[in-house]
Amino acid sequence: MIKIAPSLLAADMGDLRNAVAKVEKAGADYLHLDVMDGTFVPNISYGPAIIKTLRKNSKLFFDVHLMVEEPGRYLQDFAAAGADSICVHYEACRHLHRVIQHIKELGIKAAVALNPATPVSVLEDILPDLDMVLIMSVNPGFGGQSFIENSNNKIAKLSAMIKERGLDIDIEVDGGVYTGNIEKIAAAGANVFVAGTGIFGQPDYQAAISEMRKISENVQNKIN
């Protein structure tokens, strides 16, 4: 199923509550929350306190993306703040299986993100334990970057791996996604689309979300 996930990183940081309300009203499915620690990535964003505050006023699915070193230290905090899903980076986890199991024990969905230079083959042994895989189509840490074209090849490889094993796993894509390239991304096999400036940078949030959904659903219908 197609899911559109506006990335809060691209919103007005001085008016986050209103930004969330606007994309929720505009028809978003998920709210993508990029948590950055200034160590794993060269930027700092926000933590569980902000997410807890936003959770009080939103019914959106909170898709929390931890771009932090040793994310296992913070799982309980983000689950308590209201995360519906927690995504950790393969590159940041020394004991990935343990982290994934901990997320599941907290009663929420578990996902793994891969940086642009990390091949999908590293997920071979952990794939059956995942609810979603996030393909980073930019180098993590900053919004507003251009989509790395080779990402579509990675998405296609991952999609083939999932289908070969008969698994039910979402494929999420984050970085440089907008109405002009979502068709190719969906054709490669993705079904969850994170968009920052592709939504928050547009004059009409509802129109942007609706167009992304229409294009990606048309592609999915043709594939199926």
Image (cartoon, grey):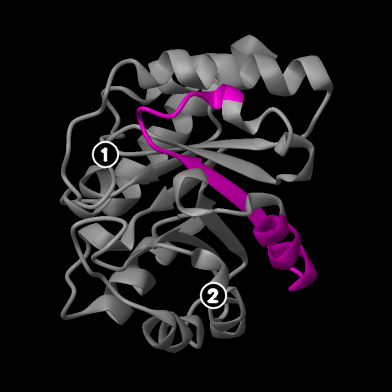
Q: Number of marks in the image?
A: 2
Image coordinates for residue 135, horizontal then vertical, percent = 46, 34
The residue positioned 41% from the left and 17% from the top of the image is 152
Q: Alpha-carbon neighbours of circle 1 within 10 Å: few (<14), some, or many (≥20)?
A: some
- Element under label 2? helix
Image coordinates for residue 183, horizontal then vertical, percent = 40, 19
State the residue in front, 138 or 206.
138
Image coordinates for residue 200, horizontal then vertical, percent = 23, 55
- Element under label 1? loop
- Is residue 71 rendered to the left or right of residue 222? left
The residue positioned 40% from the left and 45% from the top of the image is 194
Per the image, the residue denoted by label 1 is 139
State the residue in front, 23 or 90.
90
Q: Earlier in the sequence, mark 2 or mark 1?
A: 2
Q: How far apart are the two marked residues, 2 and 1, measured between alpha carbons?
A: 23 Å
- Residue type, mark 2 in image: Arg
**Compared with residue 208, is residue 73 higher up or lower down, i.e. above or below?**
below
The residue positioned 28% from the left and 34% from the top of the image is 178
| Of marks 2 and 1, the one in the foreground | 2
Whether residue 61 is visible? no
- Is residue 99 rendered to the left or right of residue 172? right
Q: Does the magenta-highlighted stretch encompass residue 117?
A: yes
**Compared with residue 39, is residue 5 higher up or lower down, i.e. above or below?**
above
Location of residue 50 (image quadrant):
bottom left
State the residue in front, 118 or 50.
118
Q: Does the magenta-highlighted stretch encompass residue 123?
A: no
- Residue type, mark 1 in image: Asn
**Which span of residues is magenta-colored?**
98-121
Give the quadrant of the N terminus.
top right
Q: Are marks 2 and 1 in contact (CB under 8 Å)?
A: no
Image coordinates for residue 131, horizontal then vertical, percent = 70, 46
Per the image, the residue denoted by label 2 is 73
